[in-house]
Amino acid sequence: MSKKYIFILLASATLGLTSCSPFNVRSDYAETANFTNYRTYKLRIDDLKLNDIDKDRVLNELSKQLQMKGLQSGENPDLIINVKANHKKITDITTSSPYGAWGWGGPFGWGIGMNRTWSSNYNEGAIIVDMVDARSNKLVWQGIGSGISVDRPKAKQKQIPEIVGEIMKNYPPQRK
C-alpha cells in the first residue's frame, strides 16, 4: 500500500476519533456584536453553585481558554463573563426484546418471551458561559455544554476542563 493511502487512512481515523465528543455543546451570539473590540474580561460567579473544587476547575480552565483567545483579565473590562452551572436528574429506561426465551418446538415453536425493563438514575451537569458587553450590559455570546457525570468525582475531574474547552471552541463565533 502506498504512503499516500496510509496517510489518508490515518487522517480519516484521527478525524473520526477527534470529532466524537461525549458532550452536547452549543452556542449563540448577537449578530451586531464586534468581537474584535473585546480585549479584557472580568469573571462573575454569582450563579456558580458548585463546590470549591469544581468551581476552581471551571474558573481555571475558563481563564486559560480566554487568555488563549487573546483576552486579558481586567478591572475595567470590555466583557463581563457570567458562569453558571446546573444539573438535572436523568432516568434511562432500557427494555430488552423477548428473543432467547424459547418454548416447545425450538426457536420458532410455541413458548413465552419476556421483555425485561430496567432503569438507571444519574445526575447530568451543565456549564453555561454568558458574555455580556460591559458598556451596553447586553448578552453578546452564550456557550452551553452538558453531559458532565456529576455523580462520579473522577469523571468530573477530567470532564470539567474538557467541556469548558469544548464550549470555548465556539468563541469567537465564525460568521457565515
Image (cartoon, grey):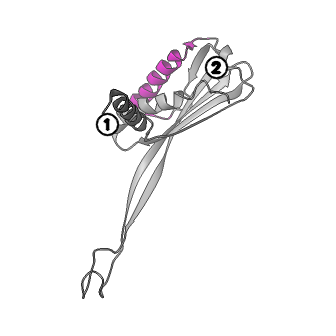
Give the residue at x 29% y 86%: 109
Which comes before the other along the chain, label 1 or label 2? 2
Which of the pair 95/44 is nearer the observer?
95
Residue 170 screen position, x and y as percent: 56, 29
Tell me: 96 left or right of 130: left
Q: What element carries label 1?
A: helix
List the residue tagged with mark 1. Answer: 154
Instruction: Report the number of numbered marks.
Output: 2
Neighbor class of circle 1 (other Cα within 10 Å; few <14, some 14-19, many 20+) is few
Which residue type carries mark 2? Leu
Taking the image as shown, residue 38 lies to the left or right of residue 121, namely right
Residue at the extreme front: 2
From the top left corner, tell me how far across and down residue 97 is, in percent. 36, 71
User: Magenta residues?
Assistant: 49-75
Q: What residue lies at 62% left-to-right and 13% top-to-bottom?
A: 39
The x, y position of residue 63, in whole percent, is 49, 19
Q: What is the chief secondary structure element of the magenta stretch?
A: helix
The residue indicated by pointer 2 is 79
Residue type at numbered disc 1: Lys
Quarter holding residue 4: top left
Q: How crowded is mark 2: few (under 14 residues within 10 Å), some or many (20 or more)?
A: many
Up the image or down, 167 lies above or below 71; here it is: below
Query: In this view of the protein, which residue sits in the foreground, 22 or 56?
Result: 22
Q: Does the magenta stretch include residue 61?
A: yes
